[in-house]
Amino acid sequence: MVRRLIAVRFFWWVLALVIVNTGLAQAPRTYILTATAYTSSVRETDPTPHITATGARTRIGIVAVSRDLLRTLPYGSKVRLEDLGTVRGGRGQFNYLFRDTVFVVEDTMNPRKRNHIDVWLPDRSTAFRFGVRNVRVTVLQVGR
């Protein structure tokens, strides 16, 4: 009877250790970052405007992060975005773009940017309306 009790306790202890080490017991990481938008324009990118830093083609769901964030959000990371509004206090009007989209980190920004995320959008007028906003970034899966 004592051996069985020890075995059961050992099983639960090992199971708890596995859950903690695999991250199943941890809440998703979230960050509040400054966000802007970019398009596939040579004036906003480099001479290959439709190709990201990882070689992927630009599309809805692609984001670029500032290089200081690549340690915590490496290429391939999957995130959800929530528009918290403009940096001047406006309301979050772009959540309709974010609601059903899982974004993937596939690009980086100019080295002068810090704590920043850049959302790819297909047209320049929407990118201008997007402006500079605060977003909540929830990490779903850390990339490579």
Image: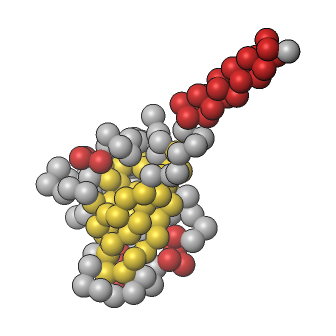
State the residue in front, 57 or 5.
5
State the residue in front, 111 or 83.
83
Picture residue at 41% right of the left edge, 42% below the top: 75
Colour scheme in the image?
secondary structure
Query: x, y percentage for residue 134?
Result: 33, 72
The C terminus is located in which quarter?
top left
Picture residue at 38% right of the left edge, 69% below the top: 135
Q: Residue furthest left?
A: 112
Asked whether the viewer can see residue 24, the reply is: yes
Left/right placement of residue 25 relative to residue 54 reads right
Q: Residue furthest bottom?
A: 90
Q: Is residue 89 above or below residue 37?
A: below
Q: Is residue 31 above or below residue 82?
A: above
Picture residue at 34% right of the left edge, 64% below the top: 32
Q: Residue furthest front?
A: 2
State the residue in front, 72 or 56.
72
Picture residue at 57% right of the left edge, 64% below the top: 101
Q: Quadrant of residue 40?
A: bottom left
The N terminus is located in which quarter?
top right
Asked whether the viewer can see residue 38, the reply is: no
Query: x, y percentage for residue 16?
Result: 63, 32
Query: x, y percentage for residue 49?
Result: 33, 56
State the residue in front, 91 or 64.
91
Query: x, y percentage for residue 55?
Result: 41, 42
Q: Residue furthest top?
A: 3
Q: Quadrant of residue 70?
A: top left
